[in-house]
Image (cartoon, helix red, strand yellow):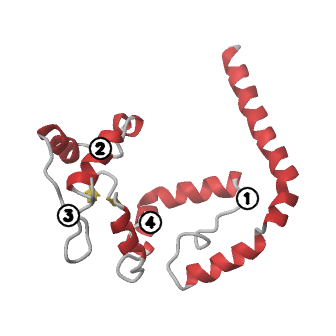
Amino acid sequence: MATQITQDGISARQALTGAQERLLKEGSLADTAIQAQPREYYAAMRRADPIHFDARLGSWLVTRHEDISAIQSDPVTFSVQHGYSEQQARGMRNEFETYLREHGGGYFPDAIMSDPPYHTRIRKLMEQAFTAHRVKALEPRITDIVRGVIAEAIARVMAHATR
């Protein structure tokens, strides 16, 4: 089915079945049942509400390529500060930051989740730091870390299973 675009460049809404309407009205990506099988939820959003506000998440969900492209081409109106940073401010940031400091080698919020031109500058620096040659050189260390994490997980499962 071809996407219908309105004059302002945003995807048009199409009719839903009653079940799809209820799913969008009552459902949320915060629901574990929807997370387990999200196909119908995404289909309903793409069809009738391609730019959908999920109240339980407190976030906008954008489901169509054309809309995503329009949003990404306007970082002033659709700044990362209006979504991602607000989510972190609701308490997720502290948990995420703590986890990365303890298990991930540090917390660097500006490396990815920032707006141009700052994002562009950081991305160019990262591209220089992570060339194919550099990543290949890191491969043995990455392999050791992954093996260690897997071995630790297996040990925990085995310890739990023997109780």
Determine which residue is flagged by label 1: 105
Query: What is the CA distance from the residue labelled 2 to the residue labelled 4?
Result: 22 Å
- Labels 2 & 1 near each other (Cβ < 8 A): no
| Amino acid type of the residue tagged 1 in the rendering | Gly
2 vs 3, front mark: 3
**Dot 2, how many residues are within 10 Å of its Cα: few (below 14), some (14-19), or many (20+)?**
some
* Residue 158: image location, x then y, percent: 72, 20
Kindly indicate whether the residue at mark 4 contacts the one at mark 1 (C-beta within 8 angstroms).
Answer: no
Q: Nearer the viewer, residue 143 or 5?
A: 5
Q: Nearer the viewer, mark 2 or mark 1?
A: 2
Please give the label number shown on residue 12. 3
Q: Residue 141 in the image: x percent, y percent?
A: 85, 52
Amino acid at circle 2 = Tyr
Query: Alpha carbon of mark 1 to alpha carbon of mark 4: how far?
Result: 21 Å
* Marks 3/4: CA–CA distance: 26 Å
* Residue type, label 4: Tyr
Give the Cα distance between marks 2 and 1.
Answer: 36 Å
Q: Nearer the viewer, mark 2 or mark 4?
A: 2
In-image side of 30 versus 148 (left or right): left
Q: Earlier in the sequence, mark 3 or mark 4?
A: 3
Residue that mark 4 sits on = 84
- Tag 4 or tag 2, which sits nearer the N-term? 2
Are discs 2 and 3 less than 8 Å apart at CB? no
Residue located beneath label 2 in the image: 41
